[in-house]
């Protein structure tokens, strides 16, 4: 006869909070992220051909291999089945030019998986987004290769196979030669494989929000801040194009939409609290525009996300203190003590008079 307690309590486990019951585990979450990345991957294949497939496959294989090998060598549980390494590989590949040599991409995968993720304890303990750090390391180590942008198959001619990105044209003062907003929206521009087609990225964003994989707060605050910052800046400084045009240009150019969707929303390296997420997204947008407009690099999305990854724990602490009103009692006591001291001083002065 089955014990009644076994029926009701056999599935209980002692663990720390939060005590949430859901069928959405890490593997399913990562699967939905891969599904959301599919439109960007398809667009990269359409515009950049077989190199997009090759580079993406190599990045996935390298990330999975590095994670498996590291965990096997150190005798840790193998976690490659959670698909997080696959997601890192795809995101890193989508941040690379299609012409990048394969061995360089493998170095980026090693940096992302071993250095940033595994050395800090594995999934859930990394201080920054692994794919973002991998891209930054490649950018700083192999700058010429990482800033050589192949033209799309629709743009290539007998005399030209590489060209500048829209942000490159802006940095060179040749904005009149840059692609139009329509081409930037559709992806018929030079740039990183997964960043060029904004429509594909927005489809992925819609999937993630609809399935409640991510919150819309960070992407909306990130993209909205870039738009508002650009609108205000170009309204003040003027130029050959309207402020609205330039605001849309900065949203569609570079990796703003892709970074806001797939990199800034990483569970581990982004804040949990609502107002912390708002601050995180706004911070990413401001830093991106500051780097684009006032620094030597034409693009600043990766650096902005990395910087805000480091600030994420602090933002969460500040938001938690505000939400739970931590420290307000101490502030009230100090304020009352100051008021009492002031009143006593006034009373003493009145007695002396």
Image: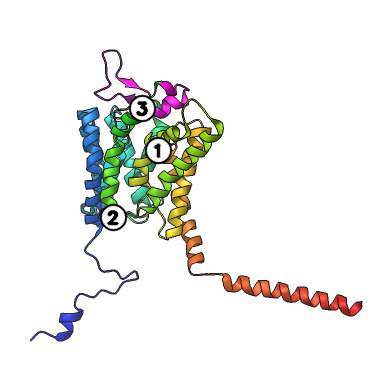
In terms of sequence position, does the residue under pointer 3 or pointer 2 come before the other?
3
At horizontal 47% and vertical 26% (from top left) the residue drawn is 171
Question: Which residue bears the numbered disc 2?
Answer: 213
Question: Which residue bears the numbered disc 1?
Answer: 251
Q: Of tags 3 and 2, which is closer to the observer?
A: 3
For label 2, the SS is: loop
Q: Which mark is on residue 350? A: none
User: Which segment did they paint magenta?
Assistant: 149-176
At horizontal 44% and vertical 33% (from top left) the residue drawn is 246
- Residue 52 drawn at (x, y percent): 23, 32
- Residue 346 drawn at (x, y percent): 82, 75
Estimate how packed mark 1 is, as few (under 14), some (14 to 19) or many (20 or more) residues with alpha carbons within 10 Å.
Answer: many
At horizontal 64% and vertical 75% (from top left) the residue drawn is 333
Query: Among all residues in the image, which is located at the extreme top?
Result: 159
- Residue 185 drawn at (x, y percent): 32, 34
Query: Among all residues in the image, which is located at the extreme right?
Result: 353
In terms of sequence position, does the residue under pointer 1 or pointer 2 come before the other?
2
Find residue 93 and report its image quarter: top left
Q: Is residue 219 left or right of residue 73?
A: right
* 208 up-or-down from 44: above or below: below
Q: Is residue 304 left or right of residue 179?
A: right
Q: How far apart are marks 3 and 2 (CA)?
A: 33 Å
- Whether 323 is among the magenta residues is no
Q: Distance between the residues labelled 1 and 2?
A: 23 Å
Q: Marks 3 and 1: in contact by CB < 8 Å?
A: no
Estimate how packed mark 2 is, as few (under 14), some (14 to 19) or many (20 or more) residues with alpha carbons within 10 Å.
Answer: some
- Residue 74 drawn at (x, y percent): 29, 53
For label 3, the SS is: loop
For label 1, the SS is: helix
- Residue 135 seen in this snapshot: yes
Q: Which mark is on residue 180? A: 3
């Amino acid at each position: 006869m089955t014990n009644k307690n076994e029926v009701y309590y056999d599935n209980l486990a002692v663990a720390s909070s939060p005590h949430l019951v859901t069928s959405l585990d890490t593997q399913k979450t990562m699967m939905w992220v891969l599904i959301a990345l599919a439109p960007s991957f398809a667009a990269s294949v359409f515009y950049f051909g077989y190199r997009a497939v090759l580079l993406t496959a190599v990045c996935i294989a390298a990330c999975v291999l590095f994670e498996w090998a590291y965990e096997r060598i150190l005798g840790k549980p193998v976690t490659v089945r959670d698909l997080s390494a696959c997601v890192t590989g795809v995101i890193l590949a989508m941040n690379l030019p299609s012409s990048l040599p394969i061995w360089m991409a493998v170095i980026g995968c090693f940096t992302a998986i071993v250095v940033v993720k595994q050395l800090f304890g594995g999934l859930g303990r990394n201080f920054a987004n692994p794919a973002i750090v991998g891209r930054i390391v490649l950018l700083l180590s192999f700058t010429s290769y990482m800033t050589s942008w192949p033209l799309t198959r629709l743009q290539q001619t007998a005399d030209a196979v590489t060209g500048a990105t829209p942000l490159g044209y802006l940095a060179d003062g040749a904005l009149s030669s840059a692609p139009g907003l329509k081409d930037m929206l559709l992806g018929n521009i030079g740039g990183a494989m997964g960043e060029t087609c904004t429509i594909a990225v927005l489809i992925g964003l819609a999937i993630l929000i609809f399935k409640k994989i991510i919150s819309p707060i960070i992407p909306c605050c990130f993209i909205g801040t870039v738009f508002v910052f650009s609108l205000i800046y170009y309204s003040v400084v003027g130029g050959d194009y309207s402020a609205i045009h330039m605001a849309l240009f900065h949203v569609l150019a570079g990796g703003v939409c892709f970074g806001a969707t797939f990199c800034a929303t990483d569970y581990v390296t982004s804040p949990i609290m609502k107002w912390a997420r708002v601050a995180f997204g706004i911070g990413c947008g401001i830093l991106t525009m500051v780097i684009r407009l006032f620094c030597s690099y034409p693009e600043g999305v990766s650096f902005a996300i990395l910087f805000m990854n480091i600030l994420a724990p602090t933002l969460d602490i500040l938001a938690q203190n505000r939400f739970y009103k931590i420290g307000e009692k101490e502030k009230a006591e100090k304020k009352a003590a100051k008021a009492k001291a002031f009143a006593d001083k006034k009373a003493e002065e009145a007695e002396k008079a």
